[in-house]
Amino acid sequence: MRHFDEELEELKSKLLEMSGLVESAISTSVTALTSLDRQLCERVFEYEDRINIMEIEIDDMATRLLALQQPMASDLRFLTSAIKINNDLERMGDLAVKIAKRALDLMDLPPVKPLVDIPEMARLAESMLHKCLDSFVRRDSALAREVLVSDDGVDDTRVEIFRVLIRAMQAEPANIPQYVDLMSVARSLERIADHATNIAEDVLFLTEGIDVRHHAETRKS
Amino acid sequence: MRHFDEELEELKSKLLEMSGLVESAISTSVTALTSLDRQLCERVFEYEDRINIMEIEIDDMATRLLALQQPMASDLRFLTSAIKINNDLERMGDLAVKIAKRALDLMDLPPVKPLVDIPEMARLAESMLHKCLDSFVRRDSALAREVLVSDDGVDDTRVEIFRVLIRAMQAEPANIPQYVDLMSVARSLERIADHATNIAEDVLFLTEGIDVRHHAETRKS
């Protein structure tokens, strides 16, 4: 049997691999949307299959490590965080699939112009995902804090996108179904950013022992 | 120090208490929406504060029990499931808050009639929440399976609500903002049902050792 620390390193690298898959799924889903490309949608569904398999592997591995020996307090928190982060990553993969399905839907409807700020919102969400995983494996709390700040920007962008889309619906009622699809995409990207924020909060709890969930900064852990 | 089994029982009862709060938050948010009642919205925000405090307590308790002694395999899975379920419950509370915020938004806009099937969808989602928690504490896999079946009904209802709302938007473009709010409510209820489904999947894994996540029924755990 290998050393516990080696197993922890392997768990970290698996989580990084999983987050790489999730990033690819998200960026592919948004490119599928902007280029109305069916093949790219299929690729997103393939990514999801791989993400789902990895989720189960990582969950099993983290649970096994919890059982293996009495982990120290810091390793224990690391392992329970890994279980939660794994869960968040898998749900981000589901959201990429939702975006790809909306892209497929749009391909069956008359085209509309404004993709508004959706690609920009996607880039922001992907960068949050990348940073929060980096902050986890490096235990870098400054990087985790950057993610929390970015989340406000994503929320503002989503509100602005909804404003533009409501105006477009009122101007072109015949195209409301397409604009509803685009709203759904903006909502999915917002949720991807929310999951990244959850992960960043877990990282801050892990690295600094302070609980920023629900602005509970004043609580002692 | 108390016996480990007693602590597990207390953890279960805390999770039941938390899910009771989440159920109250959801039903209050939907009543606030149908009766356009600001005070009920405030009550939802108060529920959320209590839910957030309980989430941290339960998370700390489960992690402490993981550390306390070498739990047996089945207790270990129970504790990691409790951590995940706690997370799902807290996010359901967030969704009740989202519904209450949409209700507040609607109070500032000209009234529209069709709340369509939203109260019915809410009742279905609440019943799923109740059943999945019961199935967890009683390790009742038949009940967990009922939740998985109900989720399809919720998804169908959401699709039908969107169809009705898109028609309403096309008929009354001036009221599109209100219908967008109602879509958001239907989406939140769908997500509440999704979280209940996630919990039911965890329960099936816990009780039967089979992994129904991602239709992985054929995999051996």
Image (cartoon, coloured by chain):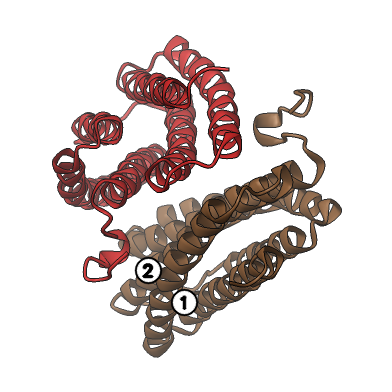
Chain colours: A brown, B red
Above or below, B178 against B38 in this view is below
Quick check: A139 left or right of B201? Answer: right
- Residue sitting at 82 percent across and 51 percent down? A141
Quarter residue A157 falls in: bottom right
Q: Position of residue B172 (x, y in %)?
A: 30, 43
Front residue of this view, candidates A84 and B138:
B138
Helix, strand or loop for disc 2: helix
Q: Quadrant of the N terminus of chain B?
A: top right
Q: Residue at x 47, y 23 (%)?
A: B7
What quarter of the picture does the C terminus of chain B occupy? bottom left
Q: Report whether mark 2 lies on the same chain as mark 1.
A: yes
Query: A50 or A194, which is in the foreground?
Result: A50
Q: Amino acid at mark 1?
A: Leu
Tell me if I can see residue A168 in this picture: no
Give me the chain letter of mark 1. Answer: A
Q: Which mark is residue A11?
A: none
Chain at tag 2: A
Q: Residues within 10 Å of mark 2 (few under 14, many from 20)?
A: many
Mark 1 nearby-residue class (10 Å; few <14, some 14–19, many ≥20): many
- Which residue matches tag 1? A33
Check contact, mark 2 vs mark 1: CB within 8 A: yes
Q: Position of residue B196 (x, y in %)?
A: 32, 41
Residue with the mark numbered 2: A102
Query: Identity of the amino acid at label 2?
Result: Arg
- Where residue A101 sits: x, y (%)? 35, 71
Residue placed farthest to the right in the image? Answer: A142
Q: Earlier in the sequence, mark 2 or mark 1?
A: 1
